Image (spheres, rainbow, N blue to C red):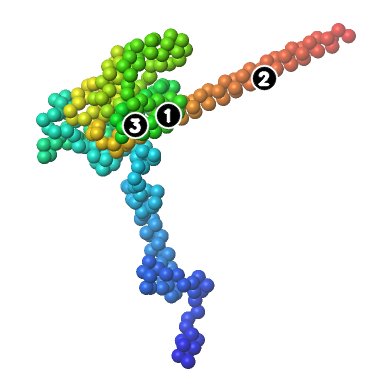
Amino acid sequence: MLRSCLARHRPRLSTLGQRRLVSTDQNIRLRGDNDWTEFQANRASFKSLVNGLAQYGSTQTRDKTWKLRDSLHKPARNATISALLAAGAHFGHASSLMNPNFMPYAYGTRSGITVIDLDQTLPLLRRAASLVRAIAANDGQIVFIGTRPDIRPVVQKAAERLEEQGYHVGDRWLPGTLTNKWQFFGHEVVRTQRVVPDLVILMNPIQNMNAIRECALENVPTIGIVDTNVDPRIVMYPIPANDESTRTAEIIAGVLSIAGREGVMIRRAEDKRKAEEEERLKEEKERRRFAQQQDELDSKAESNSFDY
């Protein structure tokens, strides 16, 4: 009897308000139009807050959540200091092993370990990425060298992103590859193909000093990850970072390879534009030639009409 009376005197709700929707608190149900309006307003406010913070690294969505091996298969276009810190790029060698020429890139020492200044690393990485993009846009060949077992997949993935313009060396740099190219590749190959790269990127420079020397003799620019025990002058474009960290190599190689892929896309777009321009000029030339022939025929027809 009481339930029937309450049901008879209950205020009539709209169709939208009669839905049994549950708010974020599972114990509270929406019982009226005002509750539904407040719930919608709170949800819209929360969504706008998430969207506003997404550009600053919010992990509210599945796509923005960090996953293992993302830096290898899905590298970021631009590196950040937080990503380099998480990868351990700032860890150097013992202070007693620091090369004196590395001093401008050192932040300080902690527990006998030299700490690399990532504020110096980031702009140098961006400079190297701009160089890779420019060389790839000018149809240059780029070689990634990483001869440690843990970074072989890194250089392979990086070279694959550049497609036909990317190459990698993952096992061992054979001495004489560039300086003795006539005997190494053969006279026919050297004359008909490009065997000297336009840029070489080294993930572990110390283990590939032969490649650095040959690039210097052949005037090939080099980019390399240099640690605290390495003289940054051995490569043309040094990137101070921990050269023994696999994740650091993944981040740096990912940034450089994506920049190279952008350069490849720029070159293809330019080639397409040139082809379309040549086709347009050819059509315009054919149109003018046809119009000239038509004028000649018209002039001949007019001259023959006066013979009567």
State the mark number for residue 152: 3
Side (left or right) of 55 relative to 232: right
Q: Which residue is mark 2?
A: 287
Amino acid tagged 3: Arg
Number of the label disc, if any, that sits on residue 129: none
Q: Quadrant of residue 280?
A: top right
Marks 1 and 3, how far apart in space? 16 Å
SS of the residue under disc 2: helix
At x 24% / y 25%, what residue is drawn?
206
Per the rendering, the mark at residue 162 is 1
Mark 2 surroundings within 10 Å by alpha-carbon count, few (fewer than 14), some (14 through 19), many (20 or more): few
Q: Is residue 17 visible?
A: no
At label 1, the amino acid type is: Leu
Residue in the image at 31% along x and 28% along y: 147
Q: Report the front residue among 168 and 300.
A: 168
> In the figure, is residue 98 to the left or right of 32?
left
Task: State how far apart marks 2 and 3 are (Cα).
Answer: 56 Å
Q: What kind of residue is marked 2?
A: Arg
Which of disc 3 and disc 1 is earlier in sequence?
A: 3
Residue at 35 percent across and 16 percent down: it is 177
Q: Residue at x 43, y 9 (%)?
A: 187
Residue 92 sits above or below residue 216 on the image:
below
Could you tell which of marks 2 and 3 lies nearer the N-terminus?
3
In the displayed structure, 260 sits above or below 70; it is above
* 2 vs 3, front mark: 3
Dot 1: element: loop
Front in this rendered view, residue 69 or 32: 69
The x, y position of residue 157, in whole percent, is 39, 33
Residue 13 visible in this rendered orientation of the protein: yes
